Image (cartoon, coloured by chain):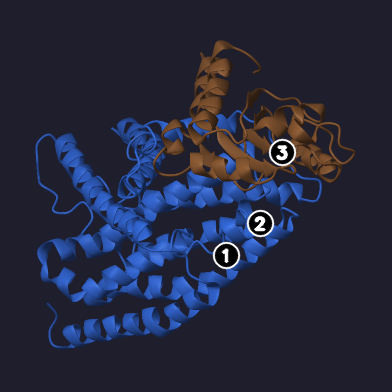
């Protein structure tokens, strides 16, 4: 029995819904992102295997570490970012009510792990020894404060409504109280916009701004390390969208008690996938509808609109809870 | 099998870097026109990159002026292997009407190795796209790895 358990957790970790699944789903997300973006611009768009081809090509290219770069940090930064994302993915409930491991406060752990890729990006840019890289790294770090606070606060609203920091409790509560989504609707959209900033996509792609600072923190990266950074970016999009789907849209719930148990896992994973794809679709629509804004515009937008609106959302949540909950 | 996978990936995802080595800007405008939504280079996996570190194909225009010679070499050296060079326009191919001038080297291939030429003054956007596709076809046939 125990041996089967160990085997199952290895399968969970490595194959489904672990690393291999996240890898494939990230590449698919990038394809979807570029394809829908192209279709909205009335283009044909890239073929299905394009992100995979990019990844293979970059991995097979020459690996350059610039003379001025700090060798250790330059190599470590993409690995740290990718590792943090993959670790965060394991906590998301996908096939059942819990992830690989569930405890009170796992929501905060995932939020924390999702901050690390941003810091890795900053470190990578800073130690690349290129002026554009350092400038991009500084932009990454300075914009962190504008979207991180609304993102945290918005994702904590459902936790406040339910009174638990555990993702399993939140999803179960949402599955039994559909009204909860209506109450936290504002938080859902704030979370989406903040996630867009976190992923450094339009209109918040200020750190990369290819018309101003070439490619930002990634200027000196080539070959394998660039491939890892790109993969980390795609995986971050999946995990971020998955987190929003779990916290606001009840993740894999409602879980049907099907026989055999594998069938119910499969259905739950399918429900999770559909919800995540819905969130990703909203992110793509947002990307194709807007143009890049300036740094000061982004910071004033975050502090004048996003954070006050988040506080309003938290106030609503507290009032609702005060009058006996949903 | 692994080698053929890498080769396939290389053909499917050529990222280009555009460099003006003293051209009159005619060819450069046509290169940008080759990337517009109407022709949609992304369906071949072509992306325009800003930094030589990300690029696979260097798209050059213009007769190499003496000033640009060192810069062109430097940008070429910054690109990671394997790298390819496509020359766009008459001046880049041979020096064009500037051939013999004291201020130009005359042709990109006098400075760096070139894989494909697209003649014309300036070439049409579809000719430029065709030049890049022909380069990819030559890689497929097994030219430079």
Picture coordinates of residue A40, whole percent (x, y): 31, 50
Chain painted in blue in the figure? A
Residue holding disc 3: B62
Is A243 positioned to the left or the right of A75 in the image? left
Chain B color in figure: brown
Picture coordinates of residue A8, whole percent (x, y): 32, 34
Please report contact status of discs 2 and 1: CB closer than 8 Å, yes or no.
Answer: yes
Residue A105 visible in this rendered orientation of the protein: no
- Tell me the SS state at disc 2: helix
Residue holding disc 2: A125
Instruction: Pick whichever, B19 or A99, lies toward us.
Output: B19
Residue neighbourhood size for the residue with mark 3, other residues' Cα within 10 Å, grouped as few (<14), some (14–19), many (≥20): many
Which residue lies at the image location 49% right of the left edge and 47% below the top edge? A232
Please tell me whether residue B23 is drawn above or below residue A107 in the rendered image.
above
Which residue lies at the image location 78% right of the left edge and 29% below the top edge? B112
Who comes first in sequence, dot 2 or dot 1? 2
Please tell me whether residue A107 is drawn above or below residue B34 in the rendered image.
below
Residue A181: name its quadrant.
Answer: bottom left
Residue holding disc 1: A140
Same chain for mark 2 and mark 1? The answer is yes
Please tell me whether residue A205 is drawn above or below residue A304 in the rendered image.
above
Marks 2/3: CA–CA distance: 33 Å
- Tell me the SS state at disc 1: helix
Same chain for mark 3 and mark 1? The answer is no
Marks 2/1: CA–CA distance: 9 Å
């Amino acid at each position: 029995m125990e041996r089967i358990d160990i085997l199952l957790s290895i399968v969970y970790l490595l194959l489904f819904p672990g690393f291999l699944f996240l890898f494939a789903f990230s590449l698919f997300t990038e394809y979807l992102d570029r394809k829908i973006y192209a279709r909205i611009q009335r283009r044909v768009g890239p073929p299905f295997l394009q992100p995979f081809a990019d990844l293979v090509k970059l991995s097979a290219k020459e690996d350059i570490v610039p003379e001025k770069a700090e060798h250790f940090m330059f190599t470590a930064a993409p690995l740290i970012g990718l590792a943090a994302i993959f670790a965060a993915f394991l906590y998301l409930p996908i096939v059942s009510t819990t992830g690989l491991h569930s405890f009170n406060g796992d929501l905060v752990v995932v939020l924390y792990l999702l901050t690390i890729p941003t810091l890795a990006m900053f470190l990578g840019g800073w130690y690349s020894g290129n002026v554009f890289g350092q400038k991009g790294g500084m932009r990454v770090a300075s914009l962190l404060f504008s979207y991180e606070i609304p993102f945290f606060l918005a994702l904590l609203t459902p936790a406040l409504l339910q009174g638990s920091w555990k993702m399993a409790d939140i999803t179960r509560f949402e599955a039994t109280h559909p009204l909860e989504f209506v109450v936290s609707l504002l938080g859902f959209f704030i979370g989406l916009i903040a996630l867009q900033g976190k992923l450094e996509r339009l209109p918040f792609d200020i750190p990369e701004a290819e018309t101003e600072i070439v490619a930002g923190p990634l200027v000196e990266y080539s070959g394998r390390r660039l491939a890892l950074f790109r993969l980390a970016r795609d995986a971050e999009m999946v995990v971020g969208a998955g987190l929003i789907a779990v916290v606001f849209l009840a993740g894999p719930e409602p879980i049907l008690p099907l026989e055999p148990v594998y069938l119910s896992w499969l259905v739950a994973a399918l429900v999770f996938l559909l919800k995540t794809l819905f969130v990703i679709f909203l992110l793509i629509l947002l990307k194709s509808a807007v143009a890049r804004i300036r740094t000061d515009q982004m910071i004033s937008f975050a502090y004048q609109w996003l954070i006050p609106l988040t506080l309003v959302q938290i106030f609503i949540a507290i009032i609702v809870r005060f009058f006996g909950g949903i | 099998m692994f080698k053929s996978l890498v080769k396939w990936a290389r053909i499917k995802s050529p990222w280009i870097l555009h460099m003006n080595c003293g051209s009159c800007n005619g060819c450069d405008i046509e290169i940008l026109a080759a990337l517009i939504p109407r022709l949609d280079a992304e369906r071949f996996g072509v992306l325009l990159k800003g930094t030589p570190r990300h690029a696979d194909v260097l798209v050059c225009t213009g007769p190499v002026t003496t000033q640009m010679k060192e810069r062109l070499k430097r940008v070429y050296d910054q690109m990671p292997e394997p790298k390819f060079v496509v020359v766009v326009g008459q001046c880049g191919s041979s020096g064009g009407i500037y051939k013999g001038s004291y201020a130009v080297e005359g042709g990109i291939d006098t400075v760096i190795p070139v894989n494909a030429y697209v003649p014309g003054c300036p070439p049409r956007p579809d000719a430029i796209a065709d030049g890049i596709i022909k380069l990819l076809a030559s890689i497929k046939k097994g030219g430079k790895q």
